[in-house]
Image: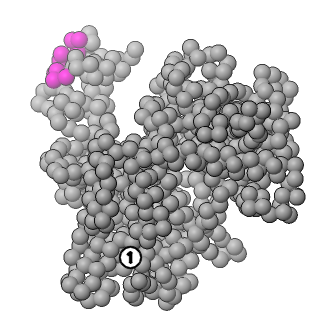
């Protein structure tokens, strides 16, 4: 073990906590000036990274001094939260307590006030360890040699002063800058490194978002070269030890515009009356080897990112659309989960194996839906698989019924269908096809089976986990239900998935259901990747993973590698090869998933603003989707959301009731879930904001 690791380990063990530099010299055995200088540099590096803190003459771990290490998560309102490195609830940072820290900074903070009544603890930043934002994009403002950048990232606190020239950019242009320094108050100076284009133009704004989130336009040359070296044909040797499933009626079911197909399915009825469900997933791990350049690039991306007009893929197109894609009529290497499912929806037997298939048909959700609806023309066109598709519908109903009985929380979250045709943007609400449900149920069942398989073997593994709601948020949700006249018998500290699903079931057909659905969603925690299995609350699953999309999700790729090592009888090697790596991969994948979600939302909001900019002056029916002290958010049927400042409401003295999600005056009341008629006042593409005026309530 090197000296750096020795010193770090001895701090962690407590041996060096509170010790002076001289003690560490003696303990290490450093006598010469060069040896002592090396130790001084190591201590400075550890101190700089926030691993240790010097107090007086001694060195301590941050926790020994009551310090909390974490990441700052700023908000658009100027305050922030600290996400502790060691996990736990986020802590509130008022603006005055940021002390120059900004969004995504790694900091040390101290607790200044314990939270009461379910409120967050309050902390104050005492040291900025590492700045989180190195480059940013924004709009050039100012003039006469005194220029600033208004960041696109509305969570970044303050403007950036431009040092040096503008590279020919005009005021109003979108530019990219690198931060060169911060002053003691956290004000940033930056140097423009790229002129993106004219602000307010759709594709300039989109490119600015992609650059802000550091999404590259292309793969690095060496990564592409490694992908190009992969054989596009399957060698007979690659089929050895794999189950031959090429004679099976296996199909892919995807969207009309999908280009990569990593999952295929089949269903048949066994002699005992049970269902056989085969879920066959592209064996990407056969081509993306652990530790390769492709693998390192895939981990750094962790996920494919989807925008209305493009995809930023996790893997190069040669793999994602080529040899790893389960194209119709092509032999492809797969990892299969073949399950026997009884009439109650229970998996009574399963087999997980290496295989190879040949997809019989590339089906779309629309085609499958037509077959499920009994469309004769489509049934005749695909007569060879028509009976199987109808059996798929039967099995989906069985699986859905079972999962409903278990208490799965089936939140109805509206999604936008955004498309671009000849530069024209359209925004509609995505339809809810039963065909989507077929694939969803099949993939969830396979994911559970694979997770259970690994869990009971007690091997290093990446699970997809979803913790139950925090007690205080569950209590707030119960209070909200009580305000609506909905009583529940369960308690916040012991809530189960079935408690939440029962509330939604009780409200079927009620106008209150969309409102309760939205508030319930806000009370839920976010699913993440973890090496520790704590179950998946939302799915009411004791054991869950992501296995079914290795082309577009890195955790699935790792799961495949682990499963294949088990199949190959190499289970004893897993701890040495994967234990430490999996914890790191789970953390990076969770962080990159969060980043991808933010980027996708930002681009969706951009396209929605572009769409609504052509509807200024128009009137629409909407539902109040959010209430704040400053105004009201309303959502249209097509999922576009707009804000109405309190000044634009009918004149009155309004009081904000956070507990009951409403603004009220002596004569009027606007609450979450109210149906309203709105007019479009403005739609700003640059800020991605839409502004409504509420014309009246709809009874």
Report if residue 21 lies within the magenta region. Answer: yes
Q: Residue at x 43, y 43 (%)?
A: 537
Q: Say above or below: 490 vs 194.
A: above
Residue 179 visible in the picture: no
Compared across the picture, whether 699 is left or right of 36 comes to: right
Q: Which residue is drawn at 40% across and 14% down?
A: 1
Where residue 26 appears, as percent x and y from the top left, is 21, 12
Report if residue 564 lies within the magenta region. Answer: no
Where residue 565 appears, as percent x and y from the top left, is 63, 21
Q: Which residue is drawn at 77% across and 25% down?
A: 242
Compared across the picture, whether 621 is left or right of 643 comes to: right
Q: What stretch is highlighted in magenta?
A: 17-27
How many marks on residues?
1
> Dot 1, how many residues are within 10 Å of its Cα: few (below 14), some (14-19), or many (20+)?
some
Q: Nearer the viewer, residue 297 or 479?
A: 479
Where residue 286 appears, as percent x and y from the top left, is 71, 30
Which quadrant of the figure contains the C terminus? bottom left
Give the residue at mark 1.
674
Q: Say above or below: 112 vs 80.
A: above
């Amino acid at each position: 073990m090197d000296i750096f690791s020795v010193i770090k380990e001895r701090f962690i063990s407590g041996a060096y906590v509170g010790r002076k530099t001289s003690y560490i010299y003696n303990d290490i055995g450093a006598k010469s000036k060069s040896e002592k200088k090396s130790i001084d540099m190591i201590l400075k590096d550890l101190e700089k990274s926030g691993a240790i803190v010097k107090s007086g003459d001694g060195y301590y771990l941050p926790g020994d001094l009551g310090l909390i290490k974490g990441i700052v998560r700023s908000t658009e309102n100027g305050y922030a939260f600290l996400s502790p490195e060691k996990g736990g609830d986020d802590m509130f940072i008022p603006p005055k307590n940021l002390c120059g820290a900004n969004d995504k900074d790694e900091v040390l903070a101290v607790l200044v006030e314990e939270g009461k009544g379910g409120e967050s603890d309050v902390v104050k930043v005492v040291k900025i360890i590492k700045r989180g934002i190195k480059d940013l994009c924004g709009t050039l403002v100012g003039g006469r040699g005194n220029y600033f950048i208004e960041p696109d990232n509305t969570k970044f606190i303050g403007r950036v002063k431009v040092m040096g020239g503008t590279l020919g950019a005009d005021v109003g242009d979108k530019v990219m800058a690198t931060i060169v320094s911060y002053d003691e108050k956290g004000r940033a100076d930056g140097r423009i490194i790229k002129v993106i284009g004219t602000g307010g133009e759709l594709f300039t704004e989109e490119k600015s978002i992609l650059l802000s989130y550091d999404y590259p336009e292309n793969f690095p040359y060496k990564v592409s070269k490694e992908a190009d070296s992969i054989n596009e044909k399957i060698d007979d040797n690659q089929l050895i030890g794999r189950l031959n499933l090429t004679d099976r009626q296996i199909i892919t079911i995807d969207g009309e515009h999908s280009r990569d197909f990593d999952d295929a399915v089949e269903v048949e009825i066994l002699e005992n009356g049970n269902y056989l469900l085969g879920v066959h997933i592209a064996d990407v791990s056969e081509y993306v080897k652990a530790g390769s350049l492709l693998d390192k690039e895939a981990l750094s991306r962790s996920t494919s990112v989807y925008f209305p007009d493009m995809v930023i893929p996790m893997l190069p197109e040669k793999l994602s659309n080529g040899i790893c894609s389960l194209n119709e009529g092509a032999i492809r290497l797969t990892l299969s989960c073949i399950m026997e499912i009884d009439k109650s929806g229970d998996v009574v037997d399963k087999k997980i194996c290496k295989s190879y298939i040949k997809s019989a048909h590339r089906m779309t959700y629309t085609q499958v839906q037509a077959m499920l609806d009994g469309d004769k023309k489509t049934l005749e066109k695909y007569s060879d698989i028509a009976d199987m598709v109808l059996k798929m519908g039967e099995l989906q109903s069985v699986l859905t019924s079972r999962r409903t009985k278990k208490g799965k929380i089936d939140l109805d979250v509206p999604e936008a269908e955004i498309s671009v045709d000849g530069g024209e943007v359209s925004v509609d609400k995505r339809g809810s096809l039963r065909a989507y449900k077929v694939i969803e149920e099949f993939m969830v069942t396979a994911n559970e089976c694979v997770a259970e398989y690994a869990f009971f073997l007690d091997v290093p593994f990446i699970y997809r986990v979803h913790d139950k709601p925090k007690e205080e948020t569950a209590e707030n949700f119960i209070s909200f239900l009580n305000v609506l006249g909905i009583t529940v018998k369960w308690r916040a500290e012991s809530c189960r998935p079935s408690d939440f699903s029962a509330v939604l079931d009780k409200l079927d057909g009620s106008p209150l259901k969309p409102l309760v659905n939205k508030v319930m969603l806000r009370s839920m925690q976010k699913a993440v990747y973890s090496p520790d299995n704590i179950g998946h609350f939302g799915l009411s699953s004791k054991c869950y993973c992501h296995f079914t999309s290795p082309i577009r999700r890195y955790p699935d790729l790792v799961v495949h590698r682990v499963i294949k090592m088990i199949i190959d009888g190499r289970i004893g090697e897993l701890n040495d090869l994967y234990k430490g790596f999996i914890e790191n991969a789970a953390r990076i994948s969770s962080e990159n998933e969060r980043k991808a979600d933010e980027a996708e939302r930002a681009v969706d909001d951009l396209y929605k603003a572009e769409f609504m900019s052509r509807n200024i002056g128009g009137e629409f029916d909407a539902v109040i989707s959010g209430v704040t002290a400053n105004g009201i958010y309303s959502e249209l049927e097509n999922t576009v959301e707009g804000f109405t400042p309190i000044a634009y409401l009918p004149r009155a003295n309004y009081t904000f009731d956070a507990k009951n999600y409403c603004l009220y005056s002596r004569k009027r009341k606007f609450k979450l879930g109210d149906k309203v008629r709105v007019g479009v006042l403005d739609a700003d593409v640059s800020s991605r904001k839409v502004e409504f005026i509420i014309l009246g309530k709809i009874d």
